Amino acid sequence: MDINNRFNRIFPSFTSLHSGLSPGHRIIDNFSNCFVFNLHSKQKDDKACTHQLDNMVIEASSSPSTAIVVTNASIKNNVATLILHTHTHDNSITKTIHHMVHITSTKAELFAMGCSINQASNHNSISKIIIITDSIHVARKIFDLSLHPFQVHSVAILTKLQWFFLQHQNNSIKFWECSSHLNWSLHKAVNKETKVFYPTLLFSSKTSWNFSKKSESDDILNIWKMTFQALDLKEKQFLDLLNDNNNIIEPFYAEEGSWLKVFGHSNSLCACTVHAITNHAPIGEYRLKFFPREEFKCLCGSYPIESRYHILHECGRFNRY
Ligand SMILES: [Zn+2]
């Protein structure tokens, strides 16, 4: 703990003993039928997804007891802007804007969902809440009963939800996934509004634990990338891998890094790929360098040296197109 507050950070706190996390009292035990996730189906194209969203809104608009909340968060200059648009039966839209400093996008989105649930559930006439978000993984965090850095927030939201479900047996909530790239009208409007703000931080403020962790790991990653490029530690032979947009894939540490997640599942494939990336594969180019008396021509007969470039881009033995 930072007792003297030397680091000016807000440390995470956990509520593992909260009654809502005990078996028998959890939301999943008592209200499993009251919450639903509507995820993007990979089989559906974007047009089908927007069509489904449109139909859902038309249907929901006819019910006076349904509230549709569209949320979005955007972070600029370390200030998060969260906006909620709450649509109700009478076609009115309630807009709520919050600014928060030095937090991560996960926390911002979670806060936005908490606000949405609070606002909508406090209306006596509302029995069905539909939250539309492009961060459905954050909505899942609310129901994650394990120990995680956002536990305090998810427990607060769960408590509110349990209260809402207890009010009436028909009360329910639905989390609807809507990716930003769909450009679906209601989400696009919220997204656009969050981008309009250019907040500037004038006074020093506390920093959340996750934000500190993120900034420190970003700094380390930048130093790592700079060292990797500038000092040429990767050496001249290193094969830069490109993504689908022809940009060089940069080193990254999360989720097995940038490369391992693609070929790390097989030891032999991993070994071959590392040979290729470092150009230490047993091919003609390598033999010419270290064992010049051995054969270094390509077996295809159309190239004097079996080089890595030739194998990857030219040789008919490997590139059958
Ligand atoms: Zn060849």
Image (cartoon, grey):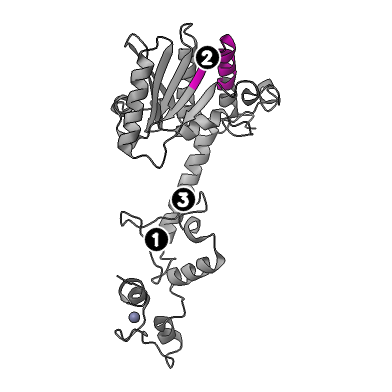
Question: Is tag 2's residue or tag 3's residue first in the polypeptide sequence?
Answer: 2
The image quarter in which residue 191 lies: top left
Ligand 1 within 8 Å of disc 2? The answer is no
Look at the image and tell me in which quarter the C terminus lies. Answer: bottom left
Residue 243 vs residue 314, the one in the foreground: 314
How far apart are the alpha carbons under marks 2 and 3?
Answer: 46 Å
User: Residue 275, how many percent across, how many down?
Assistant: 47, 72
Q: Earlier in the sequence, mark 3 or mark 1?
A: 3
Q: Nearer the viewer, mark 2 or mark 3?
A: 2
How many numbered badges does the structure rendering display?
3
* Residue stretch rendered in magenta on the structure: 157-173
Work out whether 228 lies above or below 188. below
Q: What residue is rendered at 45% in x and 28% in y?
A: 109
Label 3 element class: helix
Sort mark 3 into few (<14), some (14-19) or many (20+) by Cα contacts within 10 Å.
some
Mark 3 belongs to which amino acid?
Answer: Leu
The residue that label 3 is drawn on is 221
Instruction: Estimate the x, y position of residue 254 in percent, counting from the top left.
Output: 51, 49
Depicted 49 relative to depicted 305: above or below: above
The answer to whether one can see residue 9 in this image is: no
Amino acid type, mark 2: Asn
- Residue pointed to by mark 2: 171
Tell me how far mark 3 sits from mark 1, CA to CA: 12 Å
Residue closest to the eye, 134 or 257:
134
